[in-house]
Image: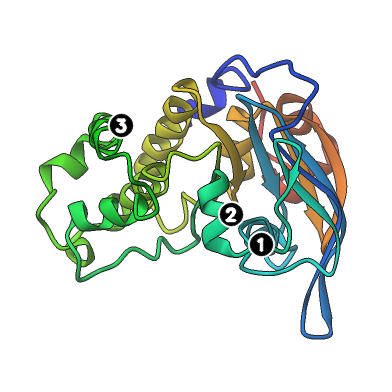
Amino acid sequence: MTTANQPNGASAANTSTQPVLALDKVSSFYGNIQALRNISLQVFPGEIVTLIGSNGAGKTTTLKTISGLIRPRTGTITLNGERIDGISPETVVARGISQSPEGRQIFPRMTVLENLEMGAFLRKDKAEIARDMESVFKLFPRLKERVKQRAGTMSGGEQQMLAMGRALMARPKVLLLDEPSMGLSPLLVETIFQIIININREGTTILLVEQNALAALSIANRGYVLQTGSIVLEDKGRNLLENENVRRTYLGETVGVE
């Protein structure tokens, strides 16, 4: 796919030594079942960082823990050096983390415009909200064409665009994307990943969870491999594409790398 030929890291990532988002030895549980085991990762300003792994590895749990939907039992999560673990999900959004969730989870009976407005629900800066709405329409022209349409009547690809646009309306410091290519045709997958590159080039830092490891690693500055709740490997995206274990496990033995 085209994204495999993009330079790793769609924008020039900030070389600051201070991560915008950092997890340090984070463990999360579902009841008595441990889902994350001492996860540590960092995302620096301007980066696209991807988290890959098999189904059930803990990728979505990681994003839910960052978003405050799951409270870590141990470890810390910081945003620009300030702890955010243990605070409410709405406060996490207000601090600067917004998520486009797995399965899109748009409001199907609401219009496209109403869904986007929900993304800015916590904001009071009306003039800036209007500017951000126009920026979303520039990224997703199809949404502008369907601004009065009920979201539930749109195609899967359009709903994914809406979920991403809604997340951007919160004006996040870090955008969390959970499986944006799920259920889409190859052509739409290519479109979505090009949009992710464009969002990053506009200055948004991205943490991407994605089952399509080839596409994700092709656009990422860096990547982490998650296995049964633990980080087992981290490296530059390009290096992970060339790693034999990653190729065999997540890309398939016959996948070539340019």
Q: CB of mark 3 within 8 Å of CB of mark 1?
A: no
Q: Which residue is drawn at 52% across and 52% down?
A: 93
Q: CB of mark 2 within 8 Å of CB of mark 1?
A: yes
The secondary element bearing badge 3 is classed as helix
- Image: 136 above or below 2: below
Q: Residue furthest bottom?
A: 32
Q: Quadrant of residue 13?
A: top right
Q: Which amino acid does label 1 sit on?
A: Ile
Q: Is tag 3's residue or tag 1's residue first in the polypeptide sequence? A: 1
Q: Which residue is drawn at 61% across and 58% down?
A: 67
Alpha carbons under labels 3 and 2: distance apart: 25 Å
The secondary element bearing badge 2 is classed as helix
Q: Residue 87 carries which label?
A: 1
Q: Quadrant of residue 126?
A: top left
Q: Is tag 2's residue or tag 1's residue first in the polypeptide sequence? A: 1
Q: Residues within 10 Å of mark 1 (few under 14, many from 20)?
A: few
Q: Which amino acid does label 2 sit on?
A: Val
- Find residue 177 and report its horizontal and vertical position in percent: 53, 48
Q: Quadrant of residue 149?
A: bottom left
Alpha carbons under labels 3 and 1: distance apart: 31 Å
- Image: 238 above or below 116: above
- Find residue 258 and report its horizontal and vertical position in percent: 64, 20
Q: Which mark is residue 41?
A: none
Reading the image, the residue beneath label 3 is 139
Closest to the camera, between mark 3 and mark 1, is 1
Q: Which mark is residue 92?
A: 2
- Image: 47 above or below 210: above
Q: How crowded is mark 2: few (under 14 residues within 10 Å), some or many (20 or more)?
A: some
